[in-house]
Image (cartoon, coloured by chain):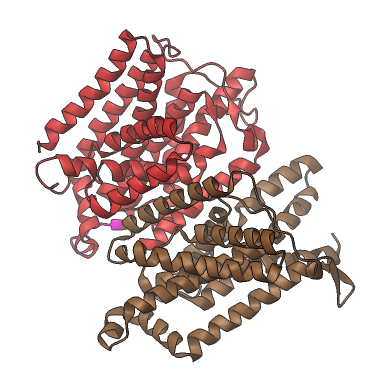
C-alpha cells in the first residue's frame, strides 16, 4: 500500500472523527450537566440533515442550508427539552432510555411521513467540490478538508465557550453541583434548555455536513449515535476533552482498520478470504478498542470518578 | 384490582384460550401471532431477570437473541445442505433436531453473555447501558460483514426443525412447544428469584454497599445472573428463528434490544409475568395499528412514552392489588 493512500485514509479518519466529536460533545455535555442519557440525539442529527437538504433544495445555497440545520436542530432541541425532556431529569436511566427511544420512533416515523422513504440528496456546493493539492503532492477532496477545518473550528469554539465565558462557567458549575448553582441564583432551567439546544445544534450541523457526503435518510442518525456512545465510553463521560480524543481515536481506528486489515491479512491468506476476514474484523475493531479501554480504565481515558 | 397471582393465572388462561379458539375457527395466522408473542415474551423473561431482579439495564440483549437465532440458522443450514460444520480437528455435522439446537443456543448465549458481562459489569449506570449497546452493535456489524452465512441477506431454512413426536409445521403443535418452554423457564426463573441467589441479586440491586458489606461478591453474582439472562434470551432467539424459518442480522439490531426492553416496561419491571403481558400487547399493537396506518410506530412511540412518564409499574402494576414487594 502506498504512503499517499495511507495519508489520504488518515485524513478520512480525521474527518470521520471530527464529525463524531460534534455528536459526542453534545451527548457528553447533556449527560454531564443534566445527568440525562439522550438516545434521541441521533434524531437531532437527522433533523439537521433533512433541514439542510430541504433548504438547499429551495434556495440552492449551501451556507443557508448549514444555517438551517443549526437552527432547526437547536429549535427542535429546545422544543423537546421544554415539553418532554425536562420531565426525565429526575427519573432513573432506564426511564430516560425508554422515553428517548420512544422519541426516536416518533421522530423517525414523522420524518418518513413528511419526506417519504426515499433518501434525499444534499449536493456539495461547486466552490467546495473537486480536490485540492496538499503539500507532498496529495490530492484530497476539498469538501472533506473543509469538514475537518469546520469541525476543528467548532471544537476550538466549544473549548473557548466552556473555559472562558460566563455561560461556560455555569455549565462547568452545573457539572460539578447542580443543586448548588441553583441555590446560588442561577436560573437552572434556562441553563438546561440552553445546553440541550447547544448539543442539538452541534448534532444538526454534523448531520448536515455528513449528509452532503452520504445520503440524507431516515435512521441515518442511529449508527452515528451508537458510535458516539463508544466515543464517550472511551473518552470518559462528561469530558469534552475526552470526547475529542475518543472521537479522533475511533475515527482513525475505524477508517484505517477498513483499509489496512484486508491488506495485512492478504500477506498470509488468499485474497478473497483475506478481504472477508479483514472486513469482518475491521467492523469490530472500534468495539475491541472500547473493550480494551474498559479493561484498563473502566471510567474512560479522561473520566474522573 | 386483583392479586398478582390471580392476574397471572388469567394471563396464562388467555394465552391458552386464544390459540385454542383459533384452531376451532381455523385461523392459523392467529396461532402464529400467539406463538410470536410467547417467544418474544421468553426473550423478555430473560432480560427481566437481569434488568428487573438484578437492576442491570442491558441495552444489548439483541446480541443473545441473535446468537440463538444464528445457532439455529447455522446448524440447520448445514443439515439442509448436507455439509459438515467443520472437519478439522473433528467432524461436526449440522442438525435439524430442536433439542440439540436449543442446547447449542443456550450454551453459546450463556458464554457470550459471560464474555460481554465480564467486560460490561466493570462499569455501572449509564456506562453499562452504552457498553452493552455497543457490544450488541458489534455483533450486528459482524453478522452483516461475515459472508459465510448470508451476510446482510440472512439465511433461509426451508423446513422447520424437528422435535421428537411432534409435527412442528402444524402451527398449534409448534405453539404448544413454545408455550411449554415458556412455562418451564417461568418456573425456573420464579424459583431462582426466590432462592438465596435471587434474593442476594435483588439485595445488591437495592443497596450494593450493603450487599458487599455482608460478604457478597456482587460482581461475580451479577455475572452469573447476566449469563443466565443471556442464555434464556438466546433460547428465545432459536425459537424465533424457527418460527420464521429465517435468520438475519436484524435479530442483532439495537431496535431488537429496545423492543425486548419495551416488553418489560409495558408489562411491568421485575414482575414475573410482565414480559408476557408486554410482548402480547406489543404484538396486538403491531397487528392492529399496523393495519390502521403505515406509520404505526408513531403511535407505539406515543404509548410507550406515556407509559414511561405516567404509568410506573406497567400494566401488571396498574391492575394488581398491592405494590410489588421485593423479589416476588
The one of A28 and A242 positioned closer to us in this rendering:
A28
Magenta residues span B213-218
The chain letter of the brown chain reads: A
Does the segment drawn in magenta span residue B214? yes
The secondary structure that dominates the magenta segment is: loop
Task: Give the residue displayed 24% in from the left and 53% down from the top.
Answer: B310
Q: Position of residue A213 (x, y in %)?
A: 71, 59
Q: Report the residue at 9% width, 45% height from top.
A: B322
Choose between A269 and A139: the one closer to the eye: A139
Q: Residue at x 53, y 72 (%)?
A: A243
Q: Colour of chain B?
A: red
Most foreground residue, B189 or A42: A42
Where B41 sits versus A125, above or below?
above
The answer, for residue B322, to whether it is visible in the render is yes
Q: Residue at x 60, y 28 (%)?
A: B155
Q: Is residue A274 above or below residue A95?
A: above
Q: Note whether A300 is above or below B321 in the view shown.
A: below
Q: Position of residue A173 (x, y in %)?
A: 37, 84
Marks counted in the figure total 0
| Quadrant of image for the N terminus of chain B | top left
Residue that extends furthest to the right in the rendered view of this protein: A137
Q: Nearer the viewer, residue A167 or B223?
A: A167
Q: Is residue A170 left or right of residue A44?
A: left
Q: As drawn, is A142 to the left or to the right of A103?
A: right
Considering the image in quadrants, where does the C terminus of chain B appear? Answer: top left
On screen, residue B175 above or below A188: above
Horizontal arrangement in the rendering, residue B145 relative to residue A85 (left or right): right
Q: Quadrant of residue B286?
A: top left
Q: Is residue A192 magenta?
A: no
Amino acid at each position: 500500500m502506498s504512503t499517499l493512500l495511507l495519508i489520504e485514509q488518515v485524513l478520512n479518519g480525521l474527518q470521520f472523527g471530527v464529525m463524531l466529536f460534534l455528536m459526542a460533545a453534545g451527548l457528553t455535555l447533556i449527560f454531564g450537566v443534566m445527568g440525562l442519557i439522550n438516545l434521541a440525539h441521533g434524531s437531532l442529527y437527522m433533523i439537521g440533515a433533512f433541514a439542510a437538504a430541504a433548504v438547499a433544495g429551495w434556495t440552492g445555497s449551501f451556507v443557508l442550508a448549514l444555517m438551517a440545520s443549526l437552527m432547526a436542530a437547536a429549535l427542535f432541541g429546545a422544543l423537546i427539552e421544554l415539553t418532554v425532556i425536562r420531565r426525565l431529569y429526575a427519573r432513573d436511566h432506564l426511564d430516560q432510555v425508554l422515553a428517548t427511544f420512544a422519541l426516536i420512533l416518533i421522530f423517525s416515523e414523522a420524518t418518513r411521513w413528511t419526506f417519504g422513504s426515499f433518501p434525499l440528496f444534499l449536493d456539495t456546493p461547486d466552490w467546495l467540490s473537486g480536490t485540492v493539492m496538499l503539500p507532498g503532492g496529495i490530492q484530497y477532496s476539498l469538501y472533506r478538508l473543509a469538514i475537518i477545518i469546520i469541525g476543528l473550528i467548532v471544537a476550538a469554539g466549544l473549548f473557548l465557550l466552556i473555559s472562558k465565558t460566563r455561560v461556560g462557567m455555569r455549565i462547568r458549575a452545573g457539572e460539578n453541583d447542580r443543586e448548588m448553582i441553583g441555590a446560588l441564583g442561577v436560573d437552572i432551567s434556562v441553563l438546561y434548555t440552553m445546553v440541550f439546544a447547544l448539543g442539538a445544534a452541534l448534532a444538526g450541523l454534523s448531520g448536515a455536513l455528513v449528509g452532503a457526503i452520504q445520503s440524507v435518510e431516515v435512521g441515518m442518525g442511529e449508527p452515528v449515535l451508537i458510535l458516539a456512545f463508544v466515543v464517550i465510553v472511551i473518552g470518559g463521560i462528561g469530558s469534552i476533552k475526552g470526547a475529542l480524543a475518543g472521537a479522533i481515536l475511533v475515527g482513525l481506528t475505524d477508517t484505517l482498520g477498513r483499509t489496512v486489515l484486508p491488506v495485512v491479512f492478504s500477506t498470509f491468506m488468499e485474497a478473497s478470504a483475506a478481504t472477508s476476514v479483514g472486513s469482518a474484523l475491521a467492523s469490530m475493531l472500534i468495539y475491541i478498542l472500547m473493550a480494551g479501554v474498559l479493561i484498563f480504565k473502566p471510567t474512560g481515558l479522561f473520566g474522573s470518578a | 384490582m386483583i392479586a398478582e397471582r390471580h392476574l397471572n393465572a388469567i394471563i396464562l388462561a388467555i394465552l391458552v384460550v386464544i390459540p385454542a379458539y383459533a384452531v376451532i375457527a381455523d385461523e392459523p395466522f392467529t396461532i402464529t401471532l400467539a406463538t410470536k408473542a410467547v417467544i418474544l415474551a421468553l426473550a423478555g423473561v430473560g432480560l427481566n431477570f437481569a434488568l428487573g431482579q438484578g437492576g442491570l439495564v442491558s441495552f444489548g440483549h439483541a446480541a443473545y437473541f441473535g446468537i440463538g437465532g444464528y445457532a439455529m440458522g447455522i446448524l440447520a443450514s448445514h443439515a439442509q445442505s448436507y455439509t459438515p460444520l467443520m472437519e478439522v480437528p473433528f467432524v461436526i455435522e449440522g442438525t435439524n433436531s430442536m433439542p440439540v439446537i436449543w442446547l447449542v443456543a443456550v450454551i453459546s448465549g450463556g458464554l457470550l453473555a459471560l464474555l460481554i458481562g465480564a467486560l460490561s459489569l466493570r462499569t455501572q449506570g449509564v456506562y453499562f447501558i452504552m457498553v452493552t449497546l455497543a457490544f450488541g452493535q458489534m455483533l450486528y456489524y459482524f453478522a452483516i460483514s461475515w459472508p459465510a452465512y448470508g451476510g446482510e441477506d440472512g439465511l433461509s431454512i426451508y423446513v422447520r426443525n424437528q422435535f421428537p413426536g411432534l409435527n412442528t409445521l402444524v402451527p398449534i403443535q409448534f405453539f404448544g412447544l413454545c408455550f411449554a418452554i415458556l412455562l418451564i423457564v417461568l418456573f425456573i426463573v420464579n424459583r431462582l428469584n426466590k432462592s438465596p441467589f435471587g434474593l442476594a441479586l435483588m439485595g445488591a440491586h437495592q443497596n450494593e454497599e450493603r450487599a458487599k458489606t455482608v460478604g457478597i461478591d456482587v460482581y461475580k453474582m451479577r455475572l452469573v445472573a447476566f449469563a443466565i439472562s443471556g442464555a434464556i434470551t438466546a433460547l428465545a432467539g432459536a425459537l424465533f428463528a424457527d418460527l420464521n424459518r429465517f435468520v438475519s442480522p436484524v435479530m442483532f439490531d439495537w431496535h431488537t434490544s429496545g423492543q425486548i426492553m419495551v416488553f418489560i416496561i409495558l408489562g411491568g419491571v421485575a414482575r414475573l409475568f410482565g414480559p408476557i403481558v408486554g410482548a402480547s400487547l406489543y404484538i396486538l399493537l403491531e397487528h392492529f395499528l399496523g393495519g390502521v396506518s403505515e406509520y404505526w410506530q408513531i403511535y407505539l412511540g406515543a404509548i410507550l412514552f406515556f407509559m414511561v412518564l405516567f404509568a410506573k409499574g406497567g400494566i401488571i402494576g396498574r391492575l394488581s392489588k398491592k405494590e410489588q414487594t421485593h423479589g416476588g
